[in-house]
Image (spheres, rainbow, N blue to C red):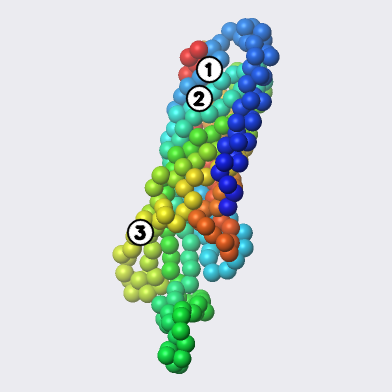
Amino acid sequence: MIPHYKFFKFFIIILFIALPIESAISSEEKNLKKPQITMGMAITYGYYDVIHDYGEGIKWEGDYGYGCGLIFEKKITNLFGIHSGIWYSKFTVKFTEPDHNDYPTEGTIDSPEESSGSIDPPPDPDNTTRINIKNQILTIPIYLITSIKFRTISVCLLTGFNFAHITKSLLYFHTTEDMTSGNSEKHSKDSKKYIEYIQLGIAGGVEIKFPLSRFVDIFFSGIAEKYFTDVIKEATQWNDYLYDYRVICGFLFRTF
């Protein structure tokens, strides 16, 4: 698990590097006729999954998620800008793990009194527990915009960082016995105490803007995100990292 203070320290350094850029090219901004600050809203839909680096006994499966957000962009020059905002999203990830219900939790199989303490029973591939983790997450992106304009259409490359906070996480599970018996009831549990709810990652994507008027743009974008913080809190035997691919559609309004 990577200490969070290192990420924030690095973010402060990036800000001190970026701020002088705007003052250095202030004279060029005076020649721009359109407002240089835009605000807008957008919706997103995408695929979320977890990378399991190593270890056995757990298999992650991805699922789809959706969300909405507010977007802010500042044009620094005709080529560069800053993209930020805040997103609220819901997504689900799944995994399976072996059940140990058919094995003793203390002693030995033949003579429990001859052994003390707990044992780790061997996994049974035919008896598993299916677990769905449903999450709600707030995300703040900080991206550098590199844009190229083709007549009225702008094509922008987005690269930067994501700061995320998982605000709610619920675990839903049912065993092989539930599924074979036709029992559709799923047991639920708050899983936030088991996960690392502060996440930081990198992102990259492409954004295409179409002007609707002098002060309004519609845009479509695709973005991929990969987080560095381990999903499982205090995990020592494996590493699990969240990633996603999303499409975004929204409007931007030039204000200043």
Question: Type of residue at label 3?
Answer: Lys
Question: Type of residue at label 2?
Answer: Phe
- N-terminal label among 3 and 2: 2
Work out whether residue 109 can be spotted.
Answer: no
Residue 230 falls left or right of residue 22: left
Between disc 1 and disc 3, the foreground one is 3
- Which residue occupies the foreground of this view, 34 or 6? 6
- N-terminal label among 1 and 2: 1
For the point 44% across and 76% down, the residue is 100
Quadrant in the picture for residue 138: top left
Q: Label 1 to label 3, Cα distance in Å? A: 44 Å
Q: Position of residue 208 (x, y in %)?
A: 58, 28
Circle 3 residue: 189
- Which residue occupies the foreground of this view, 86 or 128? 86
What element does badge 3 sit on? Answer: strand
Quadrant in the picture for residue 189: bottom left
For the point 41% across and 52% down, the residue is 192
Q: Relative to 139, does residue 53 appear above or below in the rendering? A: below
For the point 64% across and 31% down, the residue is 13
What element does badge 2 sit on? Answer: strand
Q: Check whether the beta carbons of the residues at disc 1 and disc 2 lie within 8 A of each other.
A: yes
Circle 1 residue: 37
10 Å neighbourhood of mark 1: few (<14), some, or many (≥20)? some
Which mark is on residue 72? Answer: 2
Work out whether residue 113 can be spotted.
Answer: yes
Q: Label 3 to label 2, Cα distance in Å? A: 37 Å
Q: Where is residue 122 in the image (x, y as percent from the top left)?
A: 52, 79
